[in-house]
Image (cartoon, helix red, strand yellow):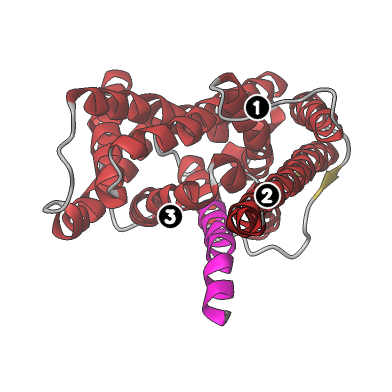
Amino acid sequence: MEAKGTEGKKPYLVVILIQVIYAGMVLFMKAAFNGGMNTFIFVFYRQAAATIIITPLAVFFEWKSAPPMTFLTFIKMFFLSFFGIALSLDICGVALDYTSATLVAATTNSLPVITFILAVLLSMEVLRLRTAPGIAKVIGMLFCIAGVVNLAFVKGPHFKIPLHLNLFGHHDIQQHHVGSSRTWVKGCFLMLLSNTLWGFWLVVQGQVTKNYPPKLLFTAFQCLFSSVQTFAIAIALERDLSQWKLGWNLRLLAVAYCGFVVSGVTYYLQTWVIEKKGPVFLSMSTPLSLIITMFFSAIFLGEIISMGSLLGGLLLVGGLYWVLWAKSREEQINKRSSDVVEVQKDGSELKEIVTTNSSPALFGVA
């Protein structure tokens, strides 16, 4: 019984770990971009690092037992990597360079709503507008839309922690971007586009893994494909060789963390959680990343948090948990309906057994 309880807690512990890792990713990326690193080159390096670390493990553990990959699965995986990883990460990098770590973490809370909408469009989820859970989901969507609009267009008073460590410096670049309203709005909507592509990746990969279940190999192939794709994008947009150099500095640390820990470890963990609990469950844990990122970006990066970011984040989290409540309520209703059907089925079977066993006796008396 205890082992079963521990097994049931594993998905929850794993999603918490995933969000902690993602908070660290945003901080390292922002620090590297503030230091002048090209966003497209950074994304290529992190995917290449992930490929280097995950491929040997995948070959060692799963290559011999893996089923053959069909050409159709190969094509699906390639385009899934392109839209869900390569484009999503490149757009996210530009958005982060334009805005702040807090905004990127906050807008990520729109991911569950985006994931749900895509799941509905792909007939993986159902939206019943005449039920309380269905209405709650719509309210959650409206809250998330209001949160994104608030993040993009509302500034308000600014807050800054007086005693911050400012480990990485580079305030001037970050302040320049935050100070430009046009750049800030553009970055906010770019982040929304990045989340849409990410939501697409979360929803569709569940279907692809049914045809190719080895999780390590699946992760390795996605890292390899996205490495090639992000390299093509980076080399087309940045020809200055000096931008491609990595030294023993923050750039290398950021690439190593995002490549080995995020792209390598987290992609595998996400695939595992999606297999166990589904894509919507994974996306429900995103507010934790916002809380961690908000405090640590203020402490370690010296970022200024605006009232608009706080209110927008609250609206997004509120919308998220409206959807979460609706999902939980639907599961309870479905479980009750399933239990009723099971009881009726068991009753019918029992009645049939009693009737069958009683018939010979009746005929005998006659």
- Residue 97 is drawn in which quadrant? top right
Label 3 CA crowd tier, 10 Å (few <14, some 14–19, many 20+): many
Query: Which residue, given by chain and number where applicable, does mark 3 sit on?
Result: 269
- Image position, residue 336 (x, y; %): 75, 48
Please say whether residue 342 is visible from this viewpoint: yes
Q: Amino acid at mark 1?
A: Cys
Residue drawn at the location 72% of the way across and 41% of the way down: 327
Please state which of residues 83 and 115 is positioned toward the viewer in this rendering: 115
Report whether 289 appears left or right of 316: left
Q: CA distance from mark 3 to mark 2?
A: 19 Å
Name, please, the residue furthest toward the front: 366
Query: What residue did someone put label 1 on?
Result: 188
Residue visible at 50% across and 26% down in the picture: 197
Magenta extent: 2-23
Q: Where residue 188 sits: x, y (%)?
A: 65, 27
Which residue is under mark 2? 290
Instruction: Provide residue 232's location: percent of width, then percent of height.
Output: 25, 23
